[in-house]
Amino acid sequence: MAALLHEKVWLDRNVYNDAEKAYYESLSKVQAPLSLARSSLASEVAKARQHIKNSLECMDSVATLAGVPNTELSTKVISLENENKDLKKAIDDLRNLVISLQVRVETLESSSSITSDCIQVQSEKPAAASTDKDDEDDDVDLFGSDDEEESAEAAKIKEERLAAYNAKKAKKPVLIAKSNIILDVKPWDDETDMAALEQAVRSISTDGLLWGAAKLVPLAYGIHKLQISCVVEDDKVSIDWLTEEIEKNEDYVQSVDIAAFNKV
């Protein structure tokens, strides 16, 4: 402790700080050239690498120009050659197929011409035979009585067959076409006797007409219409005739409309 009494380090602090600062500045000045040297060395190395790369690319281009084989190009050439071989093979197969089809068509045409000639010859032979036979018959048959008997027998057989067919056809049940109709019969006013109107409508009768159920359907202001159904045979009863017959009851009926029409 006695030795530290004569130290002036704390009294001259500014002096020591300036000295420390100067020391570190001198160190930084020494390190700056080193960093510059390192950066220049790195740039030189990069330049050398780029130069080597450029030289290698030049060598590849020179080798290509000189005819050095390239693997990618050779594979493409090989694939094109294989495709060319396949195309040639397909063309040869198509040529053979066309030739075989042509031969087959020629054979079919020749066979069809032969068959047509045979058919023509065969058709000519019966015609000639028939003419010869007619000539012989003309020479032999002097009176023609046998032909007349045969024609009479054939006509009789034909008539019997027609009669049997007509009898068989008559026995079959005939399908009768029928229609189911719903009529709306409208009165003049609310004072019309609807019971008498229905009775007047049902009084209409003819062959092929069958009346069904009926009901009163309200219209307006207390007026009701008569909705009545019927079944008619289409061949015997006409709808126009039926409506005209109903409208003849002028005391009760104002108009008649067809509400529904269905085939049975």
Image (tube, rainbow, N blue to C red):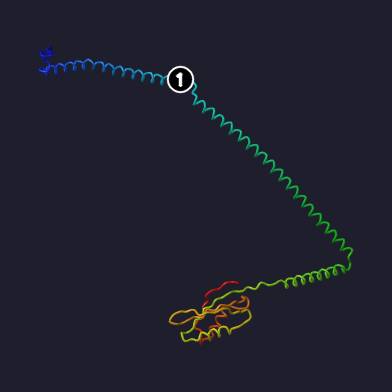
Residue bearing mark 1: 63
Please report the residue visible at 38 percent of the width from the left and 18 percent of the height from the top: 52
Residue at x-position 61% and y-position 74%: 178
Q: Nearer the viewer, residue 74 or 27?
A: 27
Which residue is pictured at 47% across the width and 87% down the height? 191
Image quadrant holding the C terminus, namely bottom right
Q: Quadrant of residue 231?
A: bottom right
Q: Secondary structure at mark 1?
A: helix
Q: Residue 117 vs residue 97: left or right?
A: right
Given residues 23 and 143, the one toward you in this image is 23
Q: Quadrant of residue 32?
A: top left
Crowding around mark 1 (Cα neighbors within 10 Å: few <14, some 14 to 19, many 20+) is: few
Q: In screen coordinates, is 193 left or right of 119?
A: left
What is the count of numbered marks? 1
Q: Is residue 36 above or below residue 208?
A: above
Tell me if 190 is positioned left or right of 86 in this view: left
Q: Measured from the top left, where is residue 245 in percent x and y?
A: 56, 83
Residue sitting at the far front: 1
The location of residue 214, given as percent across then percent down, is: 54, 79
Q: Quadrant of the N terminus?
A: top left
Q: Position of residue 34 (x, y in %)?
A: 26, 16
Q: What residue type is disc 1 on?
A: Ala
- Tell me the quarter of the picture where residue 145 sits: bottom right
